[in-house]
Amino acid sequence: MEAPPPPQDGNAKNIVRSCITCAKAKAKCVKSAGAEKCERCARLNKECTSKEPVLRRKKIVKTTRAAQLEKLESKIEHLVNTLSSGPQPSYRTNEYGQPSPPISQVSSAQDKAVVGTRTEEVLHSLCHDNNGTVHTDSSGQPTPALAPPSDIPVASAITLSEAEVLLDRYCRLMSSGMPFVVVSPGATAQTLFETKPVLLRAICTVAKFHDLPQQQALVKELVKEVAGRVLGESEKSIDIIQAILVFVAWYHPHVFWSHQVTNLLHLAIAMCIDMGIDRSPGQNQDFKAATTKAVHGPCLAQRIPTLEERRSLLGVFYMTSMLSSSFKKIDAMPFTRYMDDCLNSLEQAREHDSDLFLVQMTRIQHVIEAIHTVDSPTAPARVYIKAFQADIERLKRSDPCKGDNVFLVMQYVTAEILMWELSLIDLQENRTSSLSTHLEDLYRCVAAIQSFLDVWYTIPSSAYYLLPFSVFGQFAHAFIVLTKLASLEVEGWDLKALNEQLNFLSVIHESASAFEEATRSTPDGIAVNNDSFGKWSSRIRWMRQVYESKFTAEGNVNAALREEAERAREWDVSGSEAVQQQQLQSQSQQQSQLHTPSSENPSSMMNPTDVLNADFFNYLDENFWQSFATDFDLSYPTVGPLAHGAEGQRWWPKVG
């Protein structure tokens, strides 16, 4: 029997040597030259069909980790050589003297074509992998080519070149009030846009105070972006926490109408917990890490928290505590032992000059939070006052900052006001308590308020737009306590003596005048299209009308009644029923005029639905500032020349 002829193409592996029938039977298949069937199929009278040749796939050899790293290194080296061979960018300064983003020096069409080719090569290397797939962003869209830096939009109607100006304004004039977020001295809008885009957006938003309509639009966009990143994409980063801190620090409720500050701060607290920066690394373990530790022992190498994370954590505590102590609108983030360790680490490292200011500010706020959270005390108020007074004096003795820091001085005085206010609260809640046991504390509270106002009046009104909201929160609390003292109705309390020491109506007038002057100021040499502080002035002046209608009218009525009683005793007409009836009618008419700001102007009657009604002095903490912050668009009546600023303006001295 002859063997099958050799293959003509020389590839013996592709020749089929058996038919399908023999292959299934695993029998030898011998086919003679020219025969239609093989010998076995012809003998068994079966169908003989040849098999189609099948090309087998080559086995894929997996590359090792070392080969992958070597390939990646070669790719990076190629990118570095490509970028380094391009033309160097040049820098120029804008009209504010600040460096603008780099602008290419390509002039000719040939150079542009070369740069375009290199740019396409770099983008192709960055955006494509070995399989030819394009990297996409979180929205699923292909990453677009980079536009010129000066045309990159940071926010609505704000380009990167304008962001440079706003960033410079923030660093020069506003960053001193926010030591919890440090912007590197050499940072530009371009670098922040690439590394911390949300923080850059927040800085541009708060620095755009001179244009209120655009600032309000930026606020909406920023809140939407933060919500989309945190809630929609589950993003957690220091960038977002720092952006929230900057945003909340200048989140003046008289400027922004939406109530988002509480939501934003709770998002910051949640991110601190989820990222594990609210506790030491040894305590931040999931179930897998805890199991590994139980089986194999603790890990020798643990993550070391960065100073930036420590600042962000302390900033969240400070913001929540400030709003809690000043407005009672949110519960503060609890101060933990790890936070105290963060303070010690920052104090020892002193990476930036503002770190010492941060440490002292947080420690004072910790004492303020302790004073503020005294609830249902079992010991006398004087005992708590002595203890807190010792804590404040200890902080003053160990203060590493300079004594002329306005923010720290106002915070110290705020702590003292809260401390002496404990005696006022005890007097109001305990009606059986004697005024004589609280009198010294009340007058010390008045002296503390006077000290605060002395520092407050040294701040020029043109700087109001630059101050963080914590300063206005301290002013609001001092004003609340002064209003309580000026409206205290306790037997033996001498309002005349109080006004001789600190006149409540004068404080209202000077504060309202300063707010009005702020609307006409030009901070940083720019015209301001923002009348938010004018709304503060209108509401404060209306408070004066309410106060005068309550206490001045009441005093006049009491004086008239005393004079009428003296005449009755002198004339001895008490037996005349007609005269008695006339006296009763006269008294009822005088009493009916009580609590009426102006009987000649009906529009000046108090709105019964407004917070500032006859009982607003008794419920100031709960209702006043919420209405004060959100209802600023309401129109308030004006009475007399005071409402039109006829009593003159105060010229504020410049600081430094």
Image: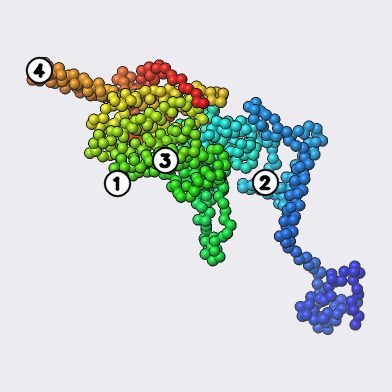
Residue marked by disc 2: 142
Residue marked by disc 3: 394
Mark 1, other Cα within 10 Å: few <14 / some 14–19 / many ≥20 = few
Q: Residue furthest left?
A: 575
Protein image colouring: rainbow
What number is the disc on residue 7?
Answer: none
Please tell me whether residue 275 is drawn above or below residue 636 in the rendered image.
Answer: below
Disc 2 versus disc 3: nearer the observer:
3
Where is residue 539 drawn, in percent x and y? 40, 27
- Foreground: 304 or 223? 304
Dot 3: element = helix
Dot 2: element = loop
Q: Quadrant of residue 373?
A: top left
Disc 4 versus disc 1: nearer the observer:
1
Q: Amino acid at mark 1?
A: Thr
Q: Are marks 1 and 2 in contact (CB under 8 Å)?
A: no
Asked if residue 539 shows in the view, the reply is no
Taking the image as shown, residue 425 lies to the left or right of residue 180, namely left
Mark 2, other Cα within 10 Å: few <14 / some 14–19 / many ≥20 = few
Residue marked by disc 4: 572
Where is residue 308 drawn, in percent x and y? 56, 44
Disc 3 versus disc 4: nearer the observer:
3
For marks 4 and 1, give the CA distance: 55 Å
For marks 3 and 1, give the CA distance: 25 Å
